[in-house]
């Protein structure tokens, strides 16, 4: 069964075509600068597996045009991987916010489209382009089932004491202001891989207590009990929680009020989402590799950013171990989590009282592993794991489940 996975951003369309019989990728690619400057400088880079990439430079004034070029690339004489679009049995779409309406992936119809649109106020940078990609595919692929896979769905198992804010309850009843959490597709995939790993070592999946650290440019953590999300760091929006590449994460809400006295709403939003985090604290970069290098070279602000980042992760590990009533494993995933041993070591430093003890050599040697890797000392009661995430494959599996 061939499945297309689509992730439409504000000015981009990322895609991957899977042969789900063997869960292999036939082609993937990225259209960039869609909409920007009328899409005149847009570019599609199409990569068939095992062959030379194809670059298409053509105006893409909207997501519909971009998706049309993507579908053409999949069947083209140069770079195509399927003889006809009729071979594609379903398409899966990443949707950032599903509100309280969706606790699982769902077949898209007009009602689902309307529900996704109704959540746009909670994710104004993400849901509208996600929806544009969906509408383009529905128009260009009539009769092909389209599936929405929500970042928020995995966290719909949070109990009220974890998702409610200490605001007047009417704001929850009337506006659904609560913790939703994000990166749910990644957390779900990694939790399942960790469950297999731990079950092989005698810990039944229903009893497993995991803390998953999705650390990339965007960062979130989740407390997972028996495969179900019990708490997570991101909130109503992806701004809450850990320090990130350019997002501030947790802060006193009064800071926002003070900023709003000096700047307009858009300036404040931009400062918190795009000028803060590693970039804002270090003054060097939003990229942890650059920040780490600068800290090692003696840059005090970069060192402060690195310390702040790792401290927040370490603090949440302790908090979530308390919330879960114990800990069987901490899992690192995503760009920083999978590749930066120095960050993992700092995040776990001082947590021996939770049973976490890292083998320094195993940790140093683990960089972007293809399979789940244990970086713990042999006798550690709780395991420290590095597991590569695969959100696209998780989306494709959901499409197969719903189409079948």
Image: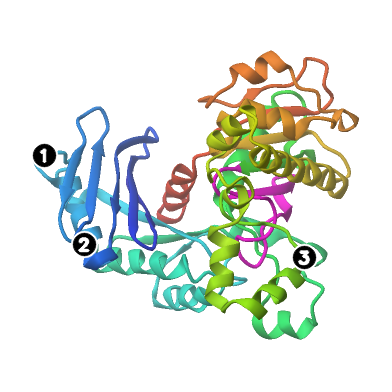
Residue occupying image coordinates x 57% and y 64%: 271
- Is residue 351 found left or right of 25 in the rendered image? right
Residue highlighted by disc 2 = 60
Q: Residues within 10 Å of mark 2 (few under 14, many from 20)?
A: many
Q: For residue 252, which numbered disc appears in the image?
A: 3
Q: Residue at x 15, y 56 (%)?
A: 58
Whether pointer 2 and pointer 3 mark residues with C-beta atoms closer than 8 Å, the reply is: no
Q: CA distance from mark 2 to mark 3?
A: 42 Å
How many angstroms separate mark 1 from mark 2 (CA)? 20 Å
Mark 3 vs mark 1, CA separation in Å: 55 Å
**Image position, residue 218 (x, y; %):** 57, 50
Q: Secondary structure at mark 2?
A: loop
Q: Is residue 86 above or below residue 262?
A: above
- Magenta segment, which residues? 215-244
Which SS class for mark 1? loop
Q: Nearer the viewer, residue 207 or 276?
A: 276
Say which label, 1 or 2, has the lower sequence index.
Answer: 2
**Badge number at residue 78:** 1
Mark closest to the chain's N terminus, 3 or 1:
1
Front label number (2 vs 3): 3
Q: Earlier in the sequence, mark 2 or mark 3?
A: 2
Q: Nearer the viewer, mark 3 or mark 1?
A: 3
Q: Does 219 lie within the magenta span? A: yes
Residue 69 picture quarter: bottom left
Is the residue 207 above or below the residue 14 in the image?
above
Say above or below: 176 vs 160.
below
């Amino acid at each position: 069964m061939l499945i297309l996975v689509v992730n439409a951003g504000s000015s981009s369309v990322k895609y991957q075509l899977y042969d789900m019989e063997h869960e292999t990728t036939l082609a993937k690619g990225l259209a960039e600068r869609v909409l920007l400057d009328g899409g005149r400088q847009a570019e599609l880079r199409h990569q068939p597996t095992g062959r030379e990439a194809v670059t298409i430079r053509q105006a893409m004034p909207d997501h519909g045009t971009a998706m049309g070029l993507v579908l053409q690339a999949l069947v083209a004489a140069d770079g195509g991987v399927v003889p006809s679009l009729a071979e594609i049995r379903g398409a899966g779409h990443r949707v950032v916010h599903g509100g309280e309406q969706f606790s699982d992936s769902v077949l898209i119809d007009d009602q689902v489209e309307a529900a996704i649109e109704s959540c746009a106020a909670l994710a104004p940078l993400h849901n509208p382009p996600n929806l544009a990609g969906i509408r383009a595919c529905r128009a260009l692929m009539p009769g092909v089932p389209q599936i929405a896979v929500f970042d928020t769905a995995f966290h719909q198992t949070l109990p009220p004491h974890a998702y409610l804010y200490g605001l007047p309850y009417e704001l929850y009843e009337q506006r659904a202001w609560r913790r939703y959490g994000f990166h749910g597709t990644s957390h779900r995939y990694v939790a399942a891989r960790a469950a297999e790993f731990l079950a092989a070592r005698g810990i039944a999946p229903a009893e497993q207590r995991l803390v998953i650290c999705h650390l990339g440019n965007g960062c979130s953590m989740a407390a997972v009990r028996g495969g179900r999300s019990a708490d997570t760091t991101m909130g109503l929006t992806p701004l809450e929680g850990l320090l990130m590449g350019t997002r501030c994460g947790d802060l006193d809400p009064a800071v926002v009020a003070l900023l709003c006295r000096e700047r307009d709403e858009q300036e404040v939003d931009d400062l918190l989402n795009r000028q803060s985090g590693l970039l804002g604290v270090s003054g060097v970069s939003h990229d942890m590799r650059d920040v780490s290098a600068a800290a090692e070279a003696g840059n005090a602000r970069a060192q402060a950013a690195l310390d702040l980042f790792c401290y927040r992760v370490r603090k949440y590990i302790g908090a979530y171990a308390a919330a879960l009533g114990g800990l069987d494993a901490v899992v690192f995933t995503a760009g920083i989590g999978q590749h930066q041993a120095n960050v993992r070591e700092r995040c776990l430093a001082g947590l021996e009282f939770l049973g976490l003890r890292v083998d320094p050599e195993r940790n140093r040697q683990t960089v972007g592993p293809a399979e789940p890797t244990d970086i713990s000392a042999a006798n550690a009661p709780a395991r420290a794991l590095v597991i590569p995430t695969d959100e696209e494959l998780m989306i494709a599996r959901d499409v197969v489940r719903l189409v079948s």
